[in-house]
Image (cartoon, rainbow, N blue to C red):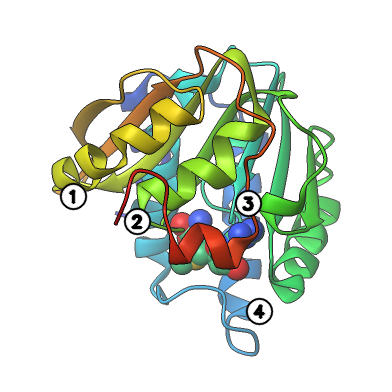
Amino acid sequence: MTERELLIKGLEQIGLNIYPQTVDNFLKFSDMLLEKNKVVNLTAITEPIEVISRHFLDCAMIAPDIISEEKVIDIGTGAGFPGLPLAILCTDTEFVLIDALRKRIDFLNQVIAQLGLKNVTAIHARAEELKSRQSFSAAVSRAVADLSVLSELTLPLVKVDGKFIAMKAQDCQNEVERATKAIQILGGGKPIIKTYTVVETDIVRAKVEIKKIKDTPLKYPRRFSKISAAPLGGK
Ligand code: SAM
């Protein structure tokens, strides 16, 4: 199966609307990612077919959860995951992708310009220093930090009644249990774990959905050194 065929088959199985432009955008993004990866460290994945399955289809699995959202932030987006595939798929949703590493954001700005995407902005920033408190209807994140640390980076940015979806490994049960107290302090509800198999693969992953049910106390987030040295709710 070619990369194009795998991508179309996978996206169809998720039940997403796909247009020729959608597929072209994904393939252009993949080319740019693999090319730039030769000089800047962006991803451990170097096979084009794995970019489709392990990056694009994996990220597309949460598109149905955010397609009706108004404004979504991706914390620690790295080379654009999951935010950029979601922005390609959910064109009526506005996305902000942030990362602490400038080189990754510079790359994303090149991709956004090349693809002509109008619904996404990439910003070089640390999540805990962002001033946009409680202004996103949803937040997403993959492979950034332990959930108790990640929740302090993320939940202060989400509006009450909004949600946070953390993409995690299949066996995240203990991590989620350890983070439950922190989530509650930060204004989140009970985390719900849903496991799923990425379409067209045998990769099993989990998404942890946390609803924001009340305001985050103003003293959070703390400085990163504090967040990581003393995660809320204990280590
Ligand atoms: N989310 C991407 C993915 O799934 O491929 C990238 C994962 S990479 C392992 C983690 C990224 O999180 C890095 O690019 C790092 O710079 C970023 N990061 C870590 N802490 C951060 C913070 N406090 N604010 C913004 N970005 C952060």
Q: Secondary structure at mark 2?
A: helix
Q: How many marks?
A: 4
Kindly report which numbered mark, 3 or 4, lies closer to the viewer in this rendering.
3
Estimate how packed mark 2 is, as few (under 14), some (14 to 19) or many (20 or more) residues with alpha carbons within 10 Å. Answer: some
The residue that disc 4 covers is: 36
Q: Secondary structure at mark 4?
A: helix
- The amino acid pointed to by label 4 is Lys
Quarter holding residue 80 = bottom right
- Give the Cα distance between marks 3 and 1: 35 Å
Q: Which mark is residue 203?
A: 1
Residue drawn 29% across the image and 54% down it: 1
Quarter holding residue 176 = top left
201 is higher (above) or lower (below) than 126: above
For marks 3 and 4 on the same chain, the one whose residue lies earlier in the sequence = 4
Q: Which mark is residue 222?
A: 3
**Image check: 173 left or right of 146?**
left
- Give the Cα distance between marks 3 and 2: 33 Å
For marks 3 and 1 on the same chain, the one whose residue lies earlier in the sequence = 1
Residue drawn 36% across the image and 55% down it: 146
Q: Secondary structure at mark 3?
A: loop
Q: Nearer the viewer, residue 176 or 46?
A: 176
Q: CB under 8 Å between callouts 2 and 1?
A: yes
For marks 2 and 4 on the same chain, the one whose residue lies earlier in the sequence = 4
Q: Disc 2 beta carbon < 8 A from ligand 1?
A: no
Residue 38 showing in the rendered view:
yes
Kindly report which numbered mark, 3 or 2, lies closer to the viewer in this rendering.
3
Residue 24 showing in the rendered view:
no
- Give the Cα distance between marks 2 and 4: 18 Å
Estimate how packed mark 1 is, as few (under 14), some (14 to 19) or many (20 or more) residues with alpha carbons within 10 Å. Answer: some
Q: CB under 8 Å between callouts 3 and 1?
A: no
- Quadrant of the snapshot with the C terminus: bottom left
Residue drawn 67% across the image and 51% down it: 127
